[in-house]
Structure formats: structure tokens, C-alpha cells
Amino acid sequence: MPTGKGMFGVARARMVVVGALLVAGGLPAVAGAATTNQGPAVVPSPPSGAPASSTTTVPDPNPPAPFALPSDFGYKLVEALHQNEAALTAAQRGLAGAERNLRTMQQRDVQVKRQLKQLGARERETQAQLDATRDHLRQAVAEAYIHAGSGEVMAAVTSFLNTSSAVDIGSQIHVITTYSSNERSALDDYLALKARVDEELTEISDLEDHSARNLRLAKERVTSLRTTIATSQKNITTALAGVALFHETATSALSPILGPSRLTAKQMADYIAFMHYSPNITVPIQVLAQYYLDEGTKTGVRGDVAFAQSILETGGFANPGSAPTDNNFAGIGWCDTCAHGINFPDARTGVRAQLQLLRIYVDPTFPDKTYTNPILLRGTLTLGFRGKVQTWWDLWGTWATGALYGQRVYDIYEKMVAFSAFDPATPAPTPAASPAPSTTTTTTVPHH
């Protein structure tokens, strides 16, 4: 495979990165990029009193100890944390409203029970009236029979006394010839009362069922959300314990590319300042560091180690391409015969392209439906070695052919970890910044 030297003398693998990107018609590049050849930045020892990094400045040519956990251990932790944090946030946001709804349903249930009690009393009163009217009608029919003595009337009376239907009573009463207007009025009252009783009984039943159903659903919703909160918190605690174990185990370049980040954006930015690097980029260095963490979470890539890779590639972000606005932090597209690398429209996009590419190297199934950002360099999806690159050590000969490339990256990362132990308390993560303006901004780095 032809090799060449990219940014800061890091030997590049032309066929792997450049060929795949340009064939795919990647993002437009700017011609006339002039590469420098000052060599990788030398990482000094941590501050006075700090322990030395477990990886020496000159990489050991022998492979380091292998990663003792499953290669997907860290990635699964990232997924678990992401899913449970999202579930926890959603449940916490929904709980207050669900509890308010439950209180409303409980208050309505009290009101419904009061209404049911009132309706019950009214129904009993109406039923008493109905019974009295029925008795009156039966007496009237008996008297009609006594006076008429007709067999036809006898049949009507028998039917009347044996039925409970007001309609049936109405159909039989017309045969009683001596039936008076008073009885006819009583029959009308009976029919009206019967309809009212039936309506009230239906109303009571519907009201009770509706109230009971709403109260049950409200209780189930609150219980479900509380269970989700408790389960998510438990799962997050378990995942964080796994993250701690991952970081204890990930002590060499043979640790996975995928997994959780360890450092904060402030610690990463402070390391750049401590090293007296001079970033020449379009956003503040801490904002850029936060991009690495954010995009790392989206892709499952260890964003802080990718940040260390960019330190190696750009000399501490001093040369992110031919110009600061190239936003190329990983030597993407640079090779021995290339006039320039790939350009990206803003800093976040440059970081996103780098972390997407790392994930593409590792995972032949990426992207799946859970990853919603468009793939910036689609030609890399057909790289033949996808899935064979799992560790930072594996980047030697795939991302770049410079000697012990992955170990050199990890050496910088371990220096960052050692430094972070002595870094001041870290505030909350920096919010994601808006896209950088076209005007180039050079970050001022304080001297320690």
C-alpha cells in the first residue's frame, strides 16, 4: 500500500482513506495546502508531583497488554447509559403531569361518588313512585274486571298482572272498556316514571364505570413512571460502575475504539493550555472539546481519545488543514501525492466526520436506524477492512502507516488522563455552540 506523510509527518495510508473518500465524491477540498514536517508533538511529563504516564513518550515497539474485557463492553455501556438517561429524563418530565392528573381523577371520583349517592336516592324515590303507580293500575284493572266480567278483560288482566313491562301494560289496557281517564293518566305517569328509572340507572352505571376507568389509568400511569425512574436510576448506577471498570482496564492502545469517554471538555481544553499548544481553529478549544464528547456519544466512539488523535494529527490543533477554516482535525485525505486533504464547513462537521470514520472502521453495520446524522464520507462505507479494526492499535496501517500510530495516539491520551488528576474542579459541560462564523479565530492559549 503506498504511503506518505500527512500533517506533522504522520505517515498516511493513501489507498485506505484518500482513495475511498475521493472516489465517493466527499466534501470539496481546497487546493494548495502546504504540509509541514515538524514531526509529532512531544508530550512532556505531567505537572510537578504527578505520576508519569503508563505509556512512555517513545512508544514501545512491542504490543501492549490486551484489553481484558469484551471488545464491545464499553460500547454497550454507552448504549445503556444513553437509553436509561433518556428514559429517566422522559419519566421525570412526565411524572409531575401524571401526578396532577391522578389528583384530578381522585377529586372527580369523590364528586362522582357524591353524584352516585344523590342519583341512588333519586332512583329509590322514583322506584317508590313507580311501585305505587303500578299498584294503582292493578287495582283499577281488577275493578274493571269485576264490573265487566268479560273473558276478554279477564285475559287482559291476567296478562297485566303477570307482566313487568310498561309497554305490555299499555297494549292490554285498551280492552278494559270501563277504564277511566284517571287510570289512563296513571298509566301515562307509570310509563314516564319507568323511562326515567331506566335512564337514571344507565347514567349511574356509565358514570361509575367512566370514573373508575379514568382513576385506574391515572394510577397505572404514575406507577409506571415511578417504576421507570427507579429502574433507570438503578441501571445508570450499574452502568457507571461498568464505566469505572472500563476505564481501569483501558490502559493501553489495545483497548477498544468504542466506549465511554473519561475526560471532560474542560480537562481536555486545559491540557491543550498546559502543553502550550497554539490552536488555530474557528471555535474556542473547550467548545471543540465538547464537540468530541457529543459526537462520541452519538457514534459510540471514545471522544476524548479521538481528541488525542487530533492532537497528534494537527500538532495541538495548530494546523487543522491548510487553513483554520478547513476544520480537518484528523488528516483525512492527506497523503504523499495529495495537494490537500478534505475540507469541512465548520468545526462540528470536521469532528463528526472523524468520529463517523472511526465508527465505520470498527462497525460494518454502521449506520443503523438509531443514528440520524447523514454520513459525510459515504465512500468509506465500502472499505474492505471494516470490522477488523477494533482497537486504537489497529489504526496502524489502516488510518495511517506511521510507526505505532495507535500507540502514539494512546500515549497522548494517557498523558491527558494523568494531567486530569491534577486539573482544577471541572464545571458543567460547555453547551454546544452555534456554527462558527466564516471569520477565522485563533484561540489564545495561556502559559502555565
Image: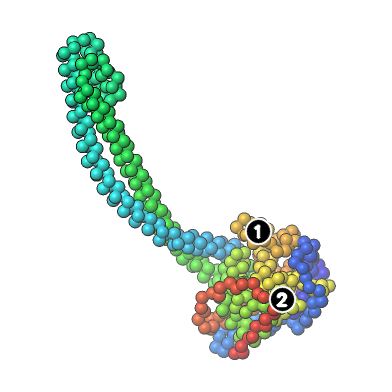
Residue for point 78% across, 82% down? 37
Residue for point 64% across, 72% down? 435
Q: Quadrant of residue 255?
A: bottom right
Task: Please provide percent x and percent y for residue 359.
Answer: 66, 64
Q: Which of 214 and 360 is in front in this view?
A: 214
Residue for point 20% across, 32% down? 129
Where the N terminus falls, by quadrant? bottom right
Q: Which of marks 2 and 1 is nearer the N terminus?
A: 2
Residue 150 in view in this figure: yes
Residue 148 in the image: above or below residue 226:
above
> The residue tagged with tag 1: helix, strand or loop?
loop
> The residue tagged with tag 2: helix, strand or loop?
helix
Q: How far apart are marks 2 and 1 (CA)?
A: 27 Å
The residue beneath circle 1 is 367
Task: Please provide percent x and percent y for residue 134.
Answer: 21, 26
Q: In which quarter of the image is residue 229?
A: bottom left
Task: Please provide percent x and percent y for residue 152.
Answer: 24, 11
Q: Which of 172 and 411 is in front in this view?
A: 172
Q: In which quarter of the image is residue 286?
A: bottom right
Q: Which colour scheme is used?
A: rainbow
Side of 377 where 211 appears, left or right: left
Q: Nearer the viewer, residue 45 or 150?
A: 150
Where the C terminus falls, by quadrant? bottom right
Side of 305 where 19 appears, left or right: right
Which labelled disc corresponds to residue 325? 2
